[in-house]
Amino acid sequence: MLDNIFLDTVKKYNLLKKKDKVILAVSGGPDSVCMFHLFCRMRERLKLNIVCAHFNHGLRKEADSDEEFVRCLCTSYKVKFVSAKKDVNNFFRGDSLEQTARRLRFDFFLQCSRYYKIRKIAIAHTRDDVIETLLMRIIRGSALRGMRAIMPKNMYKGMYIIRPLIEVDKGEVLKWLKDNNYSYVIDKTNFEDKFLRNKIRHKLIDELRKLNPNVENSLFNLSKIAAQDYDFIYRYAREKFNSLKSSAHNSIKLNLKDLNSLHPAIVNEIIRIAIENVKGDLRRLEFRHLEEIRDLIVNRPEGSIVHLPYLEVKKEENSISIKSLIL
């Protein structure tokens, strides 16, 4: 029963505790509506204080009616409703419409978190989303970090993002909604092949099933194993980073001798940690950039510089300096 899977997942990953305050991200689609009803069912049992947040992307003609659907749903269950609307097309600069929408959506969740003083945001990602995200990242050449796909719980700018449906199949969600006579809205763009995720969902996974009928389990397990392995590497690299770094204004220096004594996998992770500390994120950082920094460390003379997007990496006498070029 889906209620039990929900509770088991919450317990397994320590997602909730009694009397928690939680913001529910509800689009009106089947996954988020399922999550909404499960939280309402568990609200009294766990003494939860929940707020429903809906972000209207303004990308479809049905967007306003979807917002109204979620508003009415919240009214029916006496749940606080908050929404925001932004035309994502006005913020799109030609990189990724999906990424632009995600950034604006999470900015809204962050605003809600600060306004209501609630640090937990529940997102209705399912097991299917994990598998699709893993395949997207493999196709794009992701490293181990990216192969974790979607985590049950992670931190984002001071918020805890929790995903209590992470071990539930989409089919289970749809059946549960039908059995309980719960209505939801359909986003027709989920069936358009112009998005890579939809191509993976509707075409690639079907082809992979022909090679391995159990491919979804295999991919989901791969993601979990990658998460465990990466967690070990990250924790070790973080300890080393803290021991060999020194900080200055908008830059970090890493002790050269200590770096050269470490395994390349740990060096790469330390570089990622340093860049994230200096720049704030790892966007546009590619494996070729890490290889160039590695070559700088091992082979190039003192004074050599590697230019990365918004960053400068310089080899000094006893250290590597990573400096932000963002004003």
Image (cartoon, rainbow, N blue to C red):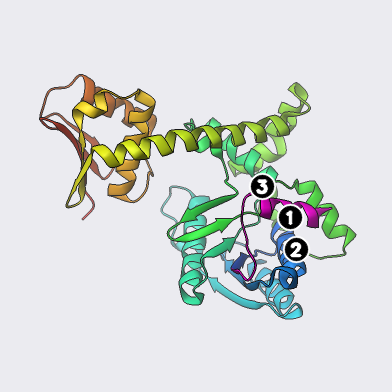
Earlier along the polypeptide chain: callout 3 or callout 1? 1
Q: SS for tag 2?
A: helix
Count of picture labels:
3
| Identity, as a three-letter code, of the amino acid under mark 1 | Phe
Q: Which of the pair 325/317 is nearer the observer?
A: 317
Q: Give the range drawn in magenta.
A: 1-21
Query: Which of the two marks, 3 or 1, is nearer to us in this view?
Result: 1
Q: SS for tag 3?
A: loop
Q: Quadrant of the C terminus?
A: bottom left
Few, some or many C-alpha atoms within 10 Å of disc 2 (few <14, some 14-19, many ≥20)?
Answer: some
Cα–Cα gap, marks 2 and 1: 8 Å
Residues at marks 2 and 1 touching, judged by CB atoms closer than 8 Å: yes
Q: SS for tag 1?
A: helix
Cα–Cα gap, marks 2 and 3: 29 Å
* Rendering coords of residue 214 (x, y %): 76, 29
Earlier along the polypeptide chain: callout 2 or callout 3? 2
Q: Name the residue under label 3.
A: 192
Residue at 48 percent across and 54 percent down: it is 155
> Considering only vertical position in the picture, is 299 above or below 29?
above
Is 212 part of what is drawn in magenta?
A: no
Cα–Cα gap, marks 3 and 1: 30 Å
Quadrant of residue 149 within the rendered picture: top right
Earlier along the polypeptide chain: callout 2 or callout 1? 1
Disc marking residue 6: 1
* Rendering coords of residue 148 (x, y %): 55, 38
Quadrant of residue 72 within the rendered picture: bottom right
Is 15 part of what is drawn in magenta?
A: yes
| Identity, as a three-letter code, of the amino acid under mark 2 | Leu
Residue at 65 percent across and 45 percent down: it is 129
* Rendering coords of residue 297 (x, y %): 22, 25
| Identity, as a three-letter code, of the amino acid under mark 3 | Glu
Q: Name the residue under label 2.
A: 38
